[in-house]
Amino acid sequence: MESKMSRNQLLISAAVAALSILGAAVFLGSKDAEAGPPKQPERSDIEAGAVLYTENCASCHGAKLEGEPDWRSPKDDGTLPAPPHDRTGHTWHHGDALLFNYTKLGGQAALAASGVTNFNSGMPGFAEQLSDQEIWDILAFIKSTWPDRMRETQEVRTKGEQIQGGS
């Protein structure tokens, strides 16, 4: 009985230590530990986002958010064509932090920051062309086109990112 108790105590101690380390990593890994990962501001302008989308995104992702043809098959250079941002794509599968960082930093840098190094993304970064608020406005516009179920699923993904502390 005593050895079982010691083993249980050891497991509990290890679990507490692991959670403490994870919590510290999340806290220290965030630029602003109080703010956490980026998420859609309450004040986003969907109409401005529609204009900005047309000016900055439609040339690759389509005027109607339809993406490039055959977007799941790699091009000759190994990159995937621009995916649709409408209900037929996978944008709604991702939380706000990933969507924001992917747009701001570009696909390669955002993935590398998340520890993904074996994927060749063709998505450029827009940090030099768009302000953070403009990126959020574009994302608000894109989200506004999704059915309720997809928006709800995307919100759950965002909450998961917030809990985990990253993108």
Image (tube, rainbow, N blue to C red):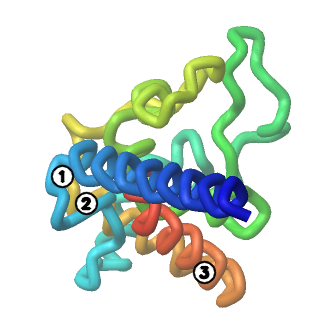
- Structural distance between the alpha carbons of marks 2 and 3: 20 Å
Distance from disc 1 to disc 3, alpha carbons, whole Å, reads: 24 Å
Q: Amino acid at mark 2?
A: Glu
Give the residue pinned by disc 3.
151
* Residue 96 in the image, given as x and y percentages of width and height: 44, 63
Q: Are marks 2 and 1 in contact (CB under 8 Å)?
A: yes
Q: Residue furthest front?
A: 2
- Of residues 31 and 93, the one drawn nearer to the viewer in this rendering: 31
How crowded is the residue under tag 2: few (<14 C-alpha within 10 Å), some, or many (20+)?
Answer: some
The residue wearing badge 1 is: 131
**Residue 119 visible (yes or no):** yes
Q: Is residue 90 left or right of residue 17?
A: right
The furthest residue to the bottom:
148
Where residue 97 appears, as percent x and y from the top left, is: 41, 56
Which quadrant is home to the N terminus?
bottom right
Nearest to the observer: residue 13 or residue 119: 13
> What element does badge 1 sit on?
loop
The residue under label 1 is which amino acid type?
Ser
Query: Residue 141, image x and y in percent?
Result: 45, 72
**Residue that appears at 23% across and 83% down:** 43
Q: Of helix, strand and loop, which one carries label 2?
A: helix
Q: Amino acid at mark 3?
A: Arg
Q: Which residue is mark 2?
A: 134
- Taking the spot 71% from the left edge, 29% from the top edge, the residue there is 80
State which quadrant residue 121 falls in.
Answer: top right
Of residues 7 and 120, the one drawn nearer to the viewer in this rendering: 7
Residue 157 vs residue 126: left or right?
A: right
Return the residue found at the far top: 77
Q: Residues within 10 Å of mark 1 (few under 14, many from 20)?
A: few
The residue under the point 41% across, 32% down is 113
User: Residue at left 25%, top 53%?
Assistant: 27
Q: How many marks?
A: 3
